[in-house]
Image: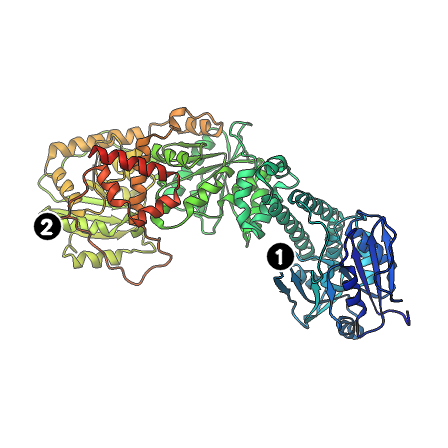
Amino acid sequence: MTSTPLLSFIVTAEEGDRAAEATLRSCLAQSLRQVEVVYVRATNAATTDPVADSRVRTVTQPAGTPVAQLRRTGLDTVTAPYVLTVEAGDEVHTGIASHLHRLIEPSDVDIVGFGVTTHDVTGAQTTLAVAAGNSLEGADIIRYLVPRETAARLDPWRAVFRTALLREAYAAAATPTMDDRGIVLLAYAAAAAYTAVKTVEYERGSAPLEATTPSPLADFHSARTRIDEFRSVEPEVRARARRDANPEPLLDAYQAGVLTLVADALARFAALSPAERADERGWLHDPTYELDAVLAAVTLAPDLMPLLATEGERLELGRKPVQSVLLTTNVLTTGGVSGVLLTQARFLLAAGHRVTIATHRPGSAEHLVPEGATLVQLTGTSRRQRVAQWAQLYRRHDVDIVIDHRILYSRDWPAFALAARAAGAATIGWIHNFAGRPTYNGNDLQTLLATHLDALAHLVVLSPLDVAFWKLRGIPHVSYLPNPPSPFLLNAGGTDAGKPAPIGRRAELVWWGRLEEHTKKVTQLVEVAAALGKLGVDFRLRIVGPAWADMNPERLHELAAKRGIADRVMATGPRHGADLLEVIDSSDVFVNTSIIEGYPLTIPEAQSRGLPIAMYDMPWLSLIQDNPGVITTPQHDPEALAIAIADVLADPTRYEAMSQASVAAAARATSYDFAQLYEQLMYGELPPENSPEPTLGDGQRILDLLLFFAEHSTPPPRATPSRAVPRARARRGRRRPRTLGERIERKLTPLGHRVIDAAPWLRPLAGNVKSVLLRRT
């Protein structure tokens, strides 16, 4: 060697690797002659230098020595102040030494980055670029090189390092054979200055590799080993963080490194055969890995979430005493979902449980929180941060059971259920609408639910037909429970007597709720009013509730004016408490035109005050089954609903009988021992009748309803539209299919077939049902 080298290359090669010669020649073919090459080879056989050059020094280690140890041995041997590690099979560009030395010499930096091109076995290539001239100092270096919430690129061949910096990092390592991504992390954290060039200087995998390809199982085991080896640097990371006034960049980078390796192990686990996964899935139950696996999937590999749900161990209810319960929703408001949650909180508190209410969005009405319950809002700016905060929440409050009310209104609930499972807390999912809601919304939430519901200990739905739907989809851990009475109903109470018929005066009709056109079809209320006007009924309709994304009081007034009934329809805006109660008590009939609901709390609220109910039919609602206080007519037929209302108003005896029946139905709806039901649920002791097995009739009804919702599918609005043009859907003159067979025959259109594709379990059932029923007609 003619002079002291300015840059050293460390080339590592494992036993049987014959690609080293091309790699060595690329290191030697530098325009800057003052380089040295330390060739570290793992072999038990006698070896000769593949390239005859005085600048090459060969060091051998026993076969099977880890690559990280080979690099460390090479680092002990080099003499240049800067070093670049190269693996056999890779190549460096001819000008890399002179190019990088021109940057190093005047600036005295610790690390110089450059672009890298990677080649896979198919010949495809990817360029990993860096920002040229991006000179950084201190904590900005690790913050830039290992951005939070992204895959951590900690490969040692991605930069030239000051030799002393790498030696200090190795000296701090817990074990000599650790994965050297940890070494790179420590070097990044200790570097004082960094710069980069934008040019590609390194070709990854450009030479042919002849080493034996390991099996998927060996790949998985290696990936797990890399996690443990990387984690061995954690004590040094924690020690440095304690000494650092700004430890977050280092801690974030360390976690990014862990999650990157865990995500890689998850991907390799997914590639195993079913039998191999069955043998290896114990690692997913290991507390050392379980939460990191969730965070890795959330951050880097969301497509692996179903794998965690199905391959992880589902927590069974009743396995331990329940003392602390966490209830969660998106935001706490006066709406129906929040009302159910708040009533549950009261029952649980009364039963002696500790209750925490966690919300995922800001804006909760804190005054609604019952005394004795704790309200917590997740504040993380990313999903990973919120999930990590979620896991800490369980431990801080010693949570035993989670009841999640967001299952049908959120796509990220599986991550939180899996994080709870990792912390030892079972999650009960609560669905507040009929199973056909995603079909009506035109989205894929049913598929998301079906592929992730194993993350839940149990699923609660609102009707036996919903139980049938999910059991037919392969989800056995499902039960139905009635909704508890709303806070409004609890506070207002009810009446023991029915209402007198509106004889000799104007009839008062009422509807209350949020003015949502998508599911509640509030414009249909105006169409019903218009039809009542044509029938000569003396009435007034009050529509009570706040504006929503797709409807507001002003637009309802405009529609009523166009229909010539502006004096008959009043959209009053929201009413609360005593004001709402006064409106209800001064009304005669509650009108409901919803196309889909789960458990409309307004129905028992209205019936508790003796109001008969006139509504479009929703046959899955347990609330209206065997309820003579309710009359139903087919969907989207305002004329039929108007005729039904007119008939009731014209018959005082029938009206008063319906009013009495409403009072009785409301009493039944509030007579459940909800405290006992929740105890039975949390301990896995609900009676079998709450989880009935599906029948052929259930399948027939589900198929018919799914086809109906598919044909009327409309995505919910995301913003307030400019102006709505209401549509009256008159059905007169069109013969309605009278038999179920005719309806299925008519609805098995291409749109219907799309539903069958989304719910494949219905395919054989559809054929059988259709053939059987058509024979009966």
Tell me which numbered mark, 2 or 1, is placed earlier along the sequence. 1
State the residue at coordinates (45%, 26%).
680
Any part of residue 609 in sight: no
Q: Quadrant of the N terminus?
A: bottom right
Q: Quadrant of residue 693?
A: top left
Q: Tell me if I can see residue 4 in this picture.
A: yes
Pinpoint residue 692: horizontal percent, then vertical percent: 38, 28
The circle on residue 529 is none
Nearer to the camera, 164 or 582 = 164
Residue found at x 25% / y 58%: 555
Q: Count all numbered tags in the image, as a single digit.
A: 2
Q: Secondary structure at mark 2?
A: helix
Type of amino acid under label 2: Lys
Task: Find numbered disc 1 in the image and state the secondary structure of the residue it sits on.
Answer: loop
Mark 1 surroundings within 10 Å by alpha-carbon count, few (fewer than 14), some (14 through 19), many (20 or more): some
Name the one closer to the observer, 345 or 63: 63
Q: Label 2 to label 1, Cα distance in Å?
A: 65 Å
Q: Amino acid at mark 1?
A: Arg
Percent position of residue 412, x then y:
49, 47
List the residue tagged with mark 1: 148
- Residue where numbered disc 2 is placed: 534
Quadrant for the C terminus in the image: top left
Q: Nearer the viewer, mark 2 or mark 1?
A: 1
Of all residues, the one furthest to the right in this rendering is: 2
Q: Please provide percent x and percent y for residue 33.
A: 84, 73
Indicate the quadrant where residue 96 lies.
bottom right
